[in-house]
Image (cartoon, rainbow, N blue to C red):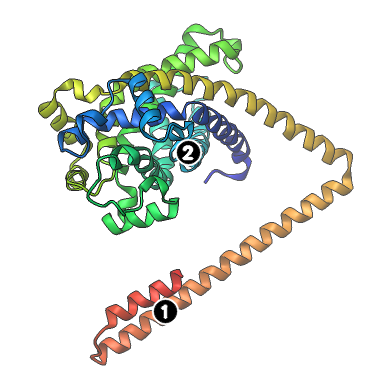
Amino acid sequence: MPHASKLLPSLGHAASGAGATVISSFLFYPLDLVNTRLKVQRQLRADGTIGPDDSYGGILDAFAIIYAKEGGRLSAYFAGLGPGLAKSAADSFLFFLFYTWFRARRLRAHNDLPYLSVLEELAVGAAAGACAKAFTTPVSNVVTRRQTASLLEMNDSNNPGKQNTSDKSFGEIVAEMRREKGLLGLWAGYSASLVLTLNPSMTFFLQQMLKRALVAREDWDEPGSPATFLLAAVSKVVATTVTYPFQIAKARGKEGSSSALAAGVRGVARDTIFATVFRIAKAEGVAALYDGVGGELLKGFFSHGTTMLFKDVIHRFLVRLYFAILAALQKYPELRARVNERIRRARSSARQASQQAYFLSVSEVYRGTRYIKSRYFAGEKGIGEYAEQRIEDKMA
């Protein structure tokens, strides 16, 4: 983690980025849902999971069919909104936290230059994306399953009494995924996510490059709202065009179904994302790698542009709030003393809780290991069952 003295600026960018992402994700969530379904419908139609009448002819057709076949309610466009916003906020917070910190460290290593080299810009973005995805991949998998649930269940007539995925809670979907693929199944597609870190990496590299080329140097820190929007939007469109085939491969490996699709998904999971892209291109043509690309580019242009626009606004507000709080603490010494005392107590409590948890866990592992060892040498059976029960008891 960043050192305390370097953490505050990173946290400011992370918080403003997360807040802006929540706003843009909510505004463009229906388009995101449609894009997800367009990415996977070709495979679902090929293996018989959905019929020809259940597929979409394009973005507008998808909006019309979803409204007509899923209750005639606007809420149909917001399936999985809660987990989706949580995932977007966490992903954005962690990405901006790591990206700002990594980039600041590299810039301090180049005191003679105000910017990084091409390779360093790409590496910083990729590293930040990889760190963020390690935490948010399980939530992303749940969101994808919720977004495609209604499309899959329209043709699932084999289990009329089965509970719809779209009606299940976040915890129920997580439990279902664990039953299907085990605990590591929650991170299905993480290796593909590592490849897709090229998308934000390229986006922010292009954004920095375009800013240096088109904006006067004295305005680099605050290029203005129109420039911020356009630079971010154009950069995202270019990066998305390059990485879209990998998004197709990743999306096809994450949708869930009780039909023959499940076997196909498990097969995809065993391959690398590059092999999946090659197989799709060979079997279905290169055009299949760009299913729904129009909607994704449209969403990327407006969503990322809006995100960066709101991020600047929120960040300026947070900076002003920070200095206002500092001024208040300087003006009222008693208030400053109370705040410092609470911070000290909070740190002390956190330290004590951490030490307590450590000693308890070490003690429990030692006692469990000693018991299993004694029973093993005594020749008793069922030691594995005992160990599993002890672990379940601790988790409960």
Which residue is the site of mark 2?
A: 81
* 306 lies above or below 156: above
Image coords of residue 292 (percent x, y): 30, 23
On screen, residue 156 versus residue 168, left or right, reads: left
Which type of secondary structure does the marked residue at label 1 adopt? helix
Which type of secondary structure does the marked residue at label 2 adopt? helix
On screen, residue 102 versus residue 383, left or right, reads: right
Image coords of residue 165 (percent x, y): 36, 48
Image coords of residue 112 (percent x, y): 52, 20
Residue 355's mark?
none
Look at 42% across and 35% down and name the residue there.
Answer: 71
Q: Amino acid at mark 1?
A: Tyr
Image coords of residue 294 (percent x, y): 33, 18
Which residue is the site of mark 1?
A: 366
Q: Amino acid at mark 2?
A: Leu
* 225 lies above or below 111: above
